Image (spheres, rainbow, N blue to C red):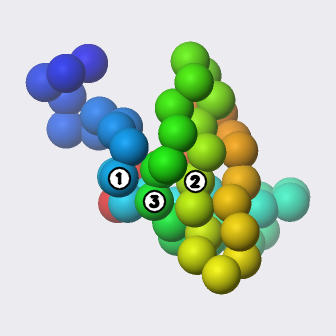
Amino acid sequence: MDSEHNELRIGSAVKVPLNDGAIWRFGWITRIDGDEITVDLGRDGSVTTTRGEIKRL
């Protein structure tokens, strides 16, 4: 995965779905623990999601 364009790293800008997926928020990856990724949403706090739910910008 190191050479893939869609590689996820700490500091990567991403978008994540909230609640039922109708709303997407932008943020930065702050922690990666296996399949779980924590995204900082700024003043709205942070959210933990999985690799399948996240999209890199």
- Sequence order check: which comes first, mark 1 or mark 2? 1
**Of helix, strand and loop, which one carries label 2?**
strand
Q: Is residue 38 left or right of residue 45?
A: left
Q: What crowding class fits label 1: few (fewer than 14 Cα within 10 Å), some (14-19), or many (20 or more)?
A: few
Comparing 57 with 41, the one in front is 41
The quarter in which the N terminus is drawn is top left
Q: Amino acid at mark 1?
A: Gly
Residue 41, above or below 10: below
Q: Are marks 3 and 2 in contact (CB under 8 Å)?
A: yes
**Label 3 Cα neighbours within 10 Å, binned few <14 / some 14-19 / many ≥20:** many
Tally of numbered tags: 3
How far apart, in angstroms, are the residues tagged by discs 3 and 2? 5 Å
Residue 43 sits in which quadrant? bottom right
The answer to whether residue 21 is seen in the rendering is yes
In the rendered image, the vertical position of residue 26 relative to residue 43, given as above or below: above
On the image, numbered disc 2 is attached to which residue? 39
Please state the horizontal and vertical placement of residue 26, each as a whole percent of the image. Answer: 52, 70
What's the CA distance linking mark 1 and mark 2?
9 Å
* Disc 1 and disc 3 in contact, CB within 8 angstroms: yes
Dot 3 corresponds to which residue? Answer: 28
Tell me residue 32's x, y (percent): 51, 32
Horizontal placement of 23 versus 32: left or right?
A: right
| Quarter the C terminus occupies | bottom left
Reply above or below: 51 against 1: below
For disc 1, the marked residue is 11
User: What residue is shown at x 58% (from left), y 75% (from top)?
Assistant: 42
